[in-house]
Amino acid sequence: MKLDKILLATTNKGKLKEFKHLLKDAEIQILSLQDMPQKIEVVEDRPTFLENAIKKAKEYALFYKVPVIAEDAGLEIDALGGFPGVYSARFFSLKEFGGEEPVQDSTDRANILKVLRLMEGEKNRTARFVSNIVLYIPEEEGFWTEGYLYGEITQSPLGEGGFGYDPIFRPIDSEKTLAQLSPEEKNRISHRGQAVRKLIKVIKQLKNE
Ligand code: IMP
């Protein structure tokens, strides 16, 4: 199958950087939404990561008529019943779970402060990151892969790297938060790293068909 160009459908700068790094050996040209002349908005309103990823991949692929990779990812905290989950990007703005967190400097920072507020005094701090990735080839077929990273929520933010909740997530068997790891170290163990490596196998197989 001719699969030389794929649109990476994300506007999240942190994600985009990680994806480009992870896909650099896939021998494929990666387009980003900035390369597309016309803009469309896809609302992520589905109850699961997979349904959101399918929705994003299909809507962008059918509009731009190119194969699309879309990811929906997030943080699931056991003591919060799996929240923020699909609301990870905008947890700070949810009226539920202790109300809205004011945004002082960044939405990532507001999300972190809300989680830390809710987790104050909580002994069970286990959590996981989830990544669901969908590759959709317009009018043909779709594929999905997933990856998980298990760990715990720290008492306070540590580290400057990564994005999102990285400063308050310490992977199992690590003394550092994700934000204290180098990009290579994070990609080696992360939910996204695992899901992308599975996706690269799918892409290689499709290119040989
Ligand atoms: P999405 O763009 O709807 O998939 O939003 C994902 C949100 O989940 C991001 O805005 C982050 O808040 C969070 N998230 C996903 N992956 C990561 C990660 O690798 N590190 C930290 N936060 C993440």
Image (tube, rainbow, N blue to C red):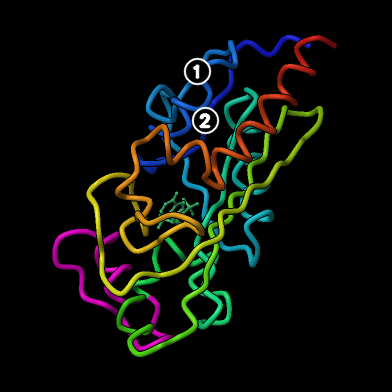
Tell me if residue 120 is in the magenta stretch: no
**Image x and y of residue 150, in percent:** 56, 60
Viewer-nearest of labels 2 and 1? Answer: 1
Query: Where 196 falls versus 105 (above or below)?
Result: above
Query: Where 38 falls versus 193 (above or below)?
Result: above
Residue at image x 65%, y 49%? 55
- Quick one: which residue is furthest to the left in this view? 104
Q: Residue tagged by mark 2?
A: 8
Query: SS at mark 1?
Result: loop
Quarter of the image for residue 63 reads top right
Residue at image x 57%, y 75%? 82
Q: Is 175 left or right of 132, judged from the image as shown?
A: left
Tell me if residue 107 is in the magenta stretch: yes
Q: Residues within 10 Å of mark 1 (few under 14, many from 20)?
A: few
Question: Which is more toward the observer, 77 or 41?
Answer: 77
Q: Where the N terminus falls, by quadrant? A: top right
* Residue bounds of the magenta highlight: 94-114
| Whether the residue under disc 2 has CB within 8 Å of ligand 1 | no
Q: Is 42 left or right of 132, judged from the image as shown?
A: left
- Quick one: which residue is furthest to the right in this view? 209
Quarter of the image for residue 99 reads bottom left
**Image x and y of residue 143, in percent:** 76, 36
Residue type (three-letter) at the residue carrying disc 1:
Lys
**Image x and y of residue 113, in percent:** 27, 73
